[in-house]
Image (cartoon, helix red, strand yellow):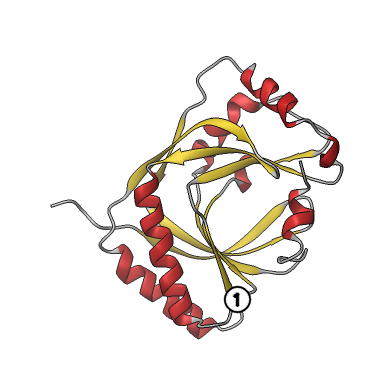
Amino acid sequence: MESFFGRVGRVWPSGRRDLHWHILPTRSEAEALMAPYTGFDHPVLCGVAPLNMHCTLLHAVGLGHTDTDDVRALVGDVGGYAEGVEPFWLTFDRPSVGAFAVEIAGWPGGRFTALVDTLTTLTERRFPGQFTPAPSRYPHMSLAYTVDGSDDVSAADLRAALAAIEQPLSGTVYVDRLHLVEQWHDGAAITWNPIAEVPLTGVTL
């Protein structure tokens, strides 16, 4: 395994505030998703608190919250799109251990990807050539990130520990709004300031 913050620091340095679009669980949804993993810990894993759980749609790498007028215009663009998008549920299942994090993946992927593609297009249209888009390829939320020293960790041992959690691990998040945030990390945790919430208000006829 490899340190998550060591890897992302190459393109997203500690302390730099980049714009992100997220799906954010409510506090009760996040606590329900995290509850089965209480006590699952490791010295080179940095657990994510329920308050900080997030499902990234788009990381606008290198784009900060510097031009308020353009950000307002972007929020307006996304709001116009969101008027035609019906809220939906994302279901998150058993966790997986990757090279940089322990995460739970969700479905349905199709509706998630449609959000990602449109947000990427609209953000690029408002900020052409000003950032590198890092769109999410599938819905997921991290339970813990790897930190320094993770190259000595056996991913198989972590998978065995997760497999020993013998209870249902499925949980849901109701996607009824999109969150634009200004996000940064300190080499151990991810934090953000909220900028805008855009409700999904479409209905099925």
Identify the residue at image location x=58%, y=14%: 166
Label 1: element kind? loop
Q: In terms of depth relative to the viewer, which is nearer, 177 or 108?
A: 108
Q: Amino acid at mark 1?
A: His
Residue 56 placement (x, y as % from top left): 53, 54
Residue that numbered label 1 is attached to: 65
Rendered image quadrant of residue 131 = bottom right
Residue 9 placement (x, y as % from top left): 76, 61
Residue 201 visible, this angle = yes
Residue 14 placement (x, y as % from top left): 78, 63
Q: Is residue 94 above or below residue 45?
A: above
Q: Is residue 199 above or below residue 75?
A: above
Residue 47 shown left or right of residue 22 in the figure = right
Q: Is residue 160 above or below residue 177?
A: above
Residue 143 shown left or right of residue 13 in the figure = left
Residue 50 shown left or right of residue 1 in the figure = left
Count how many numbered circles sit on residues in the image. 1
Q: In terms of depth relative to the viewer, which is nearer, 108 or 78?
A: 108
Identify the residue at image location x=49%, y=37%: 29
The crowding category of the residue bearing disc 1, from other C-alpha atoms within 10 Å (few below 14, some 14 to 19, many at least 20), is some
Identify the residue at image location x=56%, y=49%: 54
Residue 40 visible, this angle = no
**For the view shown, which residue lies furthest in the left direction?**
205
Identify the residue at image location x=64%, y=60%: 192
Residue 42 shown left or right of residue 19 in the figure = right
Residue 76 placement (x, y as % from top left): 38, 75
Rendered image quadrant of residue 185 = bottom right
| Quarter the N terminus occupies | top right
Q: In terms of depth relative to the viewer, which is nearer, 99 or 195?
A: 99
